Amino acid sequence: MKTSQKLQQTINDMVDDHRGILAADESTPTIKKRFDDINLESNEDNRRTYRTLLLETPGLGKFISGVILFEETLGQKNAAGTPLAEVAWSQKIVPGIKVDKGTEPLAGSPGDLVTKGLDGLSDRLKTYIDQGARFAKWREVYPITTTNPTRLGVHANAERLAHYAAICQEQGVVPIVEPEVLMDGEHDIDRCEEVTEQVLFAVFQALRQYGVTLEHMILKPNMVLPGKVCRTANPNEIAEATIRVFRRVVPAAVPSINFLSGGQSPEEATINLNAVNQIGGPWKLSISYGRALQQPVLVAWQGKPENVVAAEIALLKRARLNSLARKGGYKSSMENE
């Protein structure tokens, strides 16, 4: 199969009108924080048990089309000895892999960050492909302050994203491009809109310069939201600002926009997804949620085998409600059904 055909097949398997992506790629320090909340030790066995629970949830493939895995998870097997990538695909959930190596300060630009991991990426991708991965994810973050992100910060991060995406497509791996404008801070929704537009404009300029095929990538952006310590915006304000930015700078060739939840509660993330889809656009508007799908699962599970079914029910409920939100058919009253 030609590389372009392989990329298109992955897009076909991941992009539709009712399913989304589960982000289960938390780094070891991040999953430790999640487990600390339920007083569970973060060791390899517990991490494998938890992520197996997610992937073995009956019926999950009705609402989830892809799963982003951490490197450790991609190499793990379930209790029956089946690789977890195969467990995912048994429900027609495409397995993918987080390939970035975290952030570091950007030299010459105080307050800005840049992501590591380009060195050796091509060789690592070959290993991940052998383990079953068909797409990858790379995240750049943009803190908002009175001076950040700087012009250098915007363009340096865009170039890293584009370089990563080009390497992926060369290997037949669909890149998820994740430029996240952070919710942390005192900024209002107008400032977030301004920065998000600048960031996405630079990202798509860089993608063109690196020859990335837009039809064979997925965009994972933030919604346009006010900072956590600013006043809250209502879902209609968020949706209007978000779609306004996309119409200005995201080409219609991009097949799917899969939002990150970025610190929103599970309910907020679903309400805002619903509002965005009520406006719509030329792209599929879906999810690539981590905590907004998993938080209720962890609360239900508590690390106890007897709670597995309750945890699966919690995951399926959130996935189903977000599927309804993709059609603009979610109502808050559904949370109590």
Image (cartoon, rainbow, N blue to C red):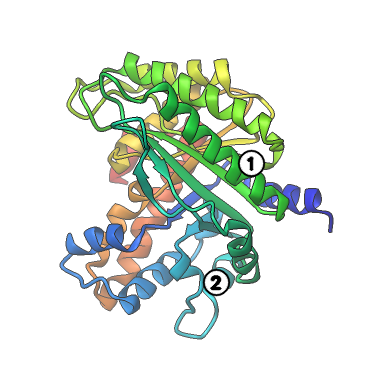
The answer to whether 62 appears left or right of 230 in the picture is right
Residue at 43% x, 71% y is: 52
Residue at 58% x, 57% y is: 121
Q: Amino acid at mark 2?
A: Val
- Residue for badge 2: 87
Query: Disc 1 and disc 2: Cα gap in Å?
Result: 24 Å
- Say whether marks 1 and 2 touch (CB < 8 Å): no
The answer to whether 186 appears left or right of 8 in the picture is left
Position of 78 relative to 165 (above/below): below
**Quadrant of res 280:** top right
- Residue for badge 1: 217
Image quarter (top left, top right, bottom left or bottom right) of the N terminus: bottom right
Residue at 49% x, 23% y is: 278
Q: Amino acid at mark 1?
A: Met
The answer to whether 155 appears left or right of 11 in the picture is left
Q: How many marks?
A: 2
Position of 119 relative to 161 (above/below): below
Q: Nearer the viewer, residue 296 or 96?
A: 96
What is the number of the mark on residue 16? none
